[in-house]
Image (spheres, rainbow, N blue to C red):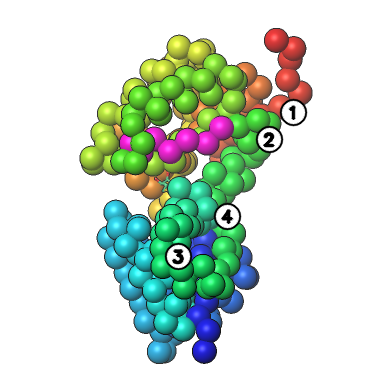
Amino acid sequence: MTGRLSVVGLGPGAAALTAPAATAALAQADDVVGYGPYVARVPERPGQQRHASDNREELDRARLALALAAAGRKVAVVSSGDAGVFAMASAVFEALDGGPPAWAALEIEVIPGISAMIAVAARLGAPLGNDFCVLSLSDNLKPWAVVERRLALAAEGGFVLAFYNPISRARPWQLGAAFDIVRQHRPPSTPVVFAAAVSRPDETILITDLGSADPAAADMRTLVLIGCEGTRLIPRADGPPWLYTARRVAPP
Ligand code: SAH
């Protein structure tokens, strides 16, 4: 019996936004490995073993998954959104890189998922319709000075900005600092969106502007989007305005 490791993105929350390929891999898995709340999203199947772990144990979790696959089991490692976006896929390859030689022979597949930015953008209209830049504000694994530098360059470069991991109990001030950096490059009227738990029952969307954006509006389930010069609002008769970024960019 040969094992297999599937690295599966579950999508942003709603079952309808999970790819059929992901659902098929989960249905075949002997073992499901991941952060507790994500494992909980996988439909239970008799005989399937579930290995739910804490949020910060990515590398241990990846090694466990590889070891189970090397022992001949069909293993699914799950992440929310896309597994390759600030999630488990890179942890799996970090573990593989320099791991036991037997792991190099394993069958591994990465199944794409709808990342939060894609789900959020679709809710709003088309804010990512032109060049954009995606950053994780988490400084758990990278120095804050690097975040600041990348952010300043992206803000200066005129990209629409999407922030993953904007805030947490351990990182309470970073989002405010990030807004201050962007304010040096963009006018107060720039649209800012706090989109939380998109496609889940507790979804909330707040559309505001850079002048009044309050970091307290974000939590761990929130993606923060900051528009660029070409980002516009279209009022809607019922419901929040549409947000889109124009395709045409003015010469510098
Ligand atoms: N791999 C995931 C991202 C994991 S990092 C993906 O591709 O979406 C966790 C961060 O993702 C959260 O802090 C939040 O910024 C964002 N996020 C995840 N799911 C979300 C959702 N349903 N709505 C809004 N943001 C979400």
User: Could you tell me which secondary element the residue under label 3 belongs to?
Assistant: strand
> Pointer 4 and pointer 3: residues touching (CB < 8 Å)?
no
- Which portion, as a residue range, is magenta? 133-139
The residue wearing badge 1 is 247
Does ligand 1 reach within 8 Å of label 4's beta carbon? yes
Q: CA distance from mark 4 to mark 2?
A: 16 Å
Residue 134 among magenta residues: yes
Q: Considering only order in the chain, which callout, 2 or 3, is on the residue closer to the N terminus? A: 3
Please tell me how crowded label 3 is: few (under 14), some (14-19), or many (20+) other residues with Cα within 10 Å: many
**Residue named by callout 4:** 114
Q: Indicate the quadrant where residue 47 lies.
A: bottom left
The residue at label 2 has a CB less than 8 Å from ligand 1: no
Q: Which residue is mark 2?
A: 129
Report if the beta carbon of the residue with label 1 is closer than 8 angstroms to ligand 1.
no
Residue at 34% in and 45% down: 220
Three-letter code, disc 1: Arg
Question: What kind of residue is marked 2?
Answer: Gly
* Relative image position of residue 11 (x, y in whole percent): 53, 58
